[in-house]
Image (cartoon, grey):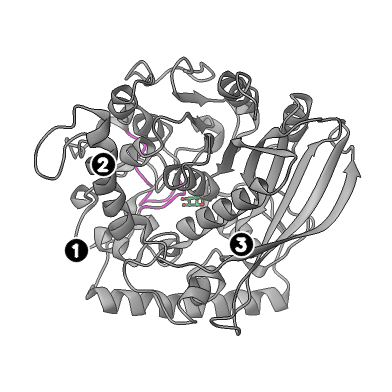
Amino acid sequence: MIIKKTTGLLFAISILTLHGYGQFGRLSPADSIRRDSINKVTQQDYKNMLAILGITSTRPGPSGNPQASNAANTDESKASPYSTLPDPLLLNNGRKVTDANTWWDKRRPEIVEDFDREVYGRVPKKTPGVNWEVISVTNDSSHHVAAIIKKLAGHVDNSSYPSISVNIDLTLTTPANANRPVPVIMEFGFVFPPGLRAPGPPAGAAEKSWQQQLLEKGWGYAVLVPTSYQADNGAGLTQGIIGLVNKGQPRRPDDWGALRAWAWGASRALDYFKTDKDVDTKRVGIEGLSRYGKATIVAMAYEPRFAIAFVGSSGAGGTKILRRVFGEQVENLASSGEYHWFAGNFIKYAGPLTPNDLPVDAHELVALCAPRPVFISSGSPKVEGQWVDAKGMFLGGVYAGPVYKLLGKKDLGTMEMPPIEIPLMDGDIAFRQHSGGHTTGPNWPYFIELASRYFDRRSK
Ligand code: GCU
């Protein structure tokens, strides 16, 4: 894989420093200068947002290093100091939702408004159009199935502010022998510098690559590069799609953060698929790991055209209940290293407010996906570590259950965390903790089995 942007490298470094995943080399002098200048601009943007919010100090988050004196909590008996969660079926006027219409017309918009304003930020009313160009079409058999790869570029209309140009990097691969539109699973893809690799086992080491599994099933896959249109740092907030819409100015407190921007790009990829006869746009799923697991659940929640989601180790800011004091905390997300994923307003919950003041929590994000299927995936605490809080992610699925049931669907079926490797997938919310590390890898066969239940019955 090649590096497209310094942000990819910085991302790799940030993973290394936070958790020690993988082995990464030293930065070249040029890259370390770039990193320092990105850090400087990020700090300025962060301070600027604190000033707008009138925040003078924030609480520091715990450390991701289990050996540190301020290590994040991993003791289940200390995980639930907050005993109540917002009720996804309780209207702001205090009445309970008992029918689907009231969910769609009243309660769902209330939850969306809270997430928009306080957590992920608002997508601008008008975003620029995207003009998709097919850059190349090639035959490929690198995943042992004859396939056709289309390289695509989504050129974002920047006539409103020509000094920022934005291009969305997307690749679509479909089986060569398909004679009708196929389902496609789109991954939010990491871009690593040469010699560096994604955390987790090398693709295809012990198991078939996920790409091969999909192609053998007769489905396609796509890889979208989020950092091609929104950088993964605070410095980039005046650039990329967020900066373009704001004409290079800093964000307002309820403007969108990177997660919603990344999800916006996924919607634009869907627009492209609509024009491509090889894709069945009624059967497109979305998948991602870690920060891109967060982007996956956000994309699924906000984009009704996604048919299914495979949410990998999304942790805090994903499907993990934010009120749980276990692993990563709101204070970490709201720090200068991660605040750019969210609306500026979210920083308030790391001081003066607390996570318990949030009007919403992660289960309601899962509930926004209802009635569509969501697969929540995690690795094993021993290998992946406890930062992602597998149980917190599981509970995000559990407490979304009442909304799925209201809409005539099945919840997880239990409130009890299943043992490692035991899938819970009889319902429309599914969960499985594999025994590997920070990867979706070992859960692909289970996700594909779940998706088949929905995809195999229908055709375009
Ligand atoms: C850090 C961060 C997580 C994030 C992860 C990743 O660990 O704290 O919230 O999910 O990076 O994206 O790799």
Judging by the rendered image, the residue that carries numbered circle 2 is 105
**Residue 257 visible somewhere in the drawing:** yes
Prevailing secondary structure of the magenta residues: loop
Q: Measuring 85% from the left and 56% from the top, which residue is drawn there?
A: 136
Judge whether 252 appears above or below 305 on screen. Answer: below
Amino acid type assigned to the residue bearing label 2 in the image: Asp
Relative image position of residue 118 (x, y in whole percent): 28, 58
Judge whether 218 appears above or below 273 on screen. Answer: above
Give the side of residue 214 with respect to residue 387, left or right. right
Give the side of residue 124 with respect to residue 357, left or right. right
Query: Which of the two discs, 2 and 3, sits closer to the camera?
Result: 2
Residue 8, quarter of the rendered image: bottom right
Q: Is mark 3 within 8 Å of ligand 1?
A: no
* Cα distance in 3D space between marks 1 and 3: 31 Å
- The quadrant of the rendering that contains the N terminus is bottom right
Report the front residue among 302 and 447: 302
Judge whether 235 appears above or below 401 on screen. Answer: below
* Cα distance in 3D space between marks 1 and 2: 33 Å
Judging by the rendered image, the residue that carries numbered circle 1 is 352
Amino acid type assigned to the residue bearing label 3 in the image: Thr
Q: Is residue 107 magenta?
A: no
Residue 134, quarter of the rendered image: bottom right
Residue 227: give its label.
3
Element type at marker 1?
loop
Report the front residue among 259 and 442: 259
**Residue 78 visible somewhere in the drawing:** no
Give the side of residue 235 with respect to residue 125, left or right. right
Amino acid type assigned to the residue bearing label 1 in the image: Pro
Q: Is residue 73 magenta?
A: yes
Q: Which residues are magenta?
A: 62-75
- The quadrant of the rendering that contains the C terminus is top right
